[in-house]
Each structure stands twice: as C-alpha cells, then as structure tokens.
Amino acid sequence: MNEENKDLNEEMVNESIHPESQSDQSEDAAATAQSESEEVVLLTEKYKRLYADFENFRRQSAKAKTELLSVASKDVLVKLLPVLDDFERAMKANENVEDPTTLKQGFELIYSILKRNLESEGLKAFESTGEPFDTEFHDAVTKFPAPDESLKNKVIDTLEKGYTLNDRVIRFAKVVVGE
C-alpha cells in the first residue's frame, strides 16, 4: 500500500511541476481520436463504394448471362429452321407418294441435316451398349441377368441415347445393366 501511495504522490508532484505535459497529452489524445474517427468515416465510405460497385457488377453479370443465353438459343433455333422447312416440304410431298423407299430416304436426309446442325453446336451422342456401366454417363433403368460372365456390370441395352455438349453430359443414357 505504501508503494501505491508513493506512486500517486509522484504523479501529483509531476503534474503540479509539469502542467503543460498533461495538456499536451490531452491534445494528443484528442488529435488521435479525431484522426481515428476520420479514418473510420473514410473506410466506411470506401466500403459503401465497393459494395455498390459489387452490386452493379452482379447485376451487369446477370444481365449479360441472360442476353448470352438468349443469343445462343437464337443461333441454335436459326440452324433448326431449315430442318423444320424440310419436314413441312416432306409432309406435302409425301401426300401422294406410294413408294416407301422414297419416304425413308427423305426422312434419312432430314435426320442427317438435323444431326449435322446439332453436332456443329457441340452436341454428341455417346455409345453405351457393351460399355462398362459408369454412373457419370449412364442411368440404370433396370438390371437384367447377363447372358454370359463378360457382360456383368456392362450395358446390355440402351433404351435412350446419352448426349454430351462440349464434353459435358447433358443427358444420361438410360440403360439396362447386366448383373
């Protein structure tokens, strides 16, 4: 307790001897507090500007994505219009045709045009029958007893083809798997 009293007495003596040091300290504290509050205001403004910029960027990105998708769809649809026209012409021409070979050739021609247009957009069908079952590409509709051991865990039959778009699966092949 004596030491605490001694420290307090020394402090009081120092303050009475050097009163300007106390006012300097309070001025320094006031200046520091003011500079800190100015810094807080500047940082708050900077944060608000950054947040506003981010929100604007987010809105612009969403708008650009929507526009890109609509334009991409437009390009694909424009490529499909000739196929639609070919089907309409085929239906009119087939009203009086009695030869099934001509009908078959017409449909094969239209199919090849459609397939070529879709492949030019990056669409590819992939083969599944006889391949090992892979959940990355196949959707097993059912399992069926394999006719022989070599077909276990392999695709026995493809019910619906699978497709990739630019090497990404967009539709899994629906398959029957041997067990």
Image (cartoon, rainbow, N blue to C red):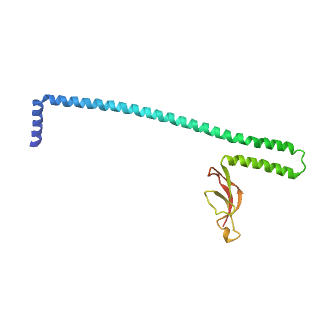
Horizontal placement of 137 versus 3: left or right? right
84 left or right, relative to 32: right
* Location of residue 49 by image quarter: top left
**Foreground residue among 70 and 20:** 70
Quarter occupied by residue 90: top right
Rendering quarter of residue 8: top left
In front: 49, or 89?
89
* Left or right: where 154 falls relative to 34: right
* Residue furthest bottom in the image: 149
Q: Is residue 66 above or below residue 168?
A: above
In the shown orientation, is residue 36 left or right of residue 22?
right
* Picture coordinates of residue 54, whole percent (x, y): 48, 36
Question: Which quadrant: the N terminus?
Answer: top left
Residue depicted at x 37% and y 33%: 43
Residue 23 drawn at (x, y percent): 18, 28
Q: Total label count? A: 0
In this view of the protein, which residue sits in the foreground, 158 or 125? 125
Residue 173 percent location from the top left of the image = 67, 56
Residue at the (80%, 49%) spot, across then down: 107
Quadrant in the picture for the C terminus: bottom right
Residue at the (50%, 33%) spot, across then down: 56
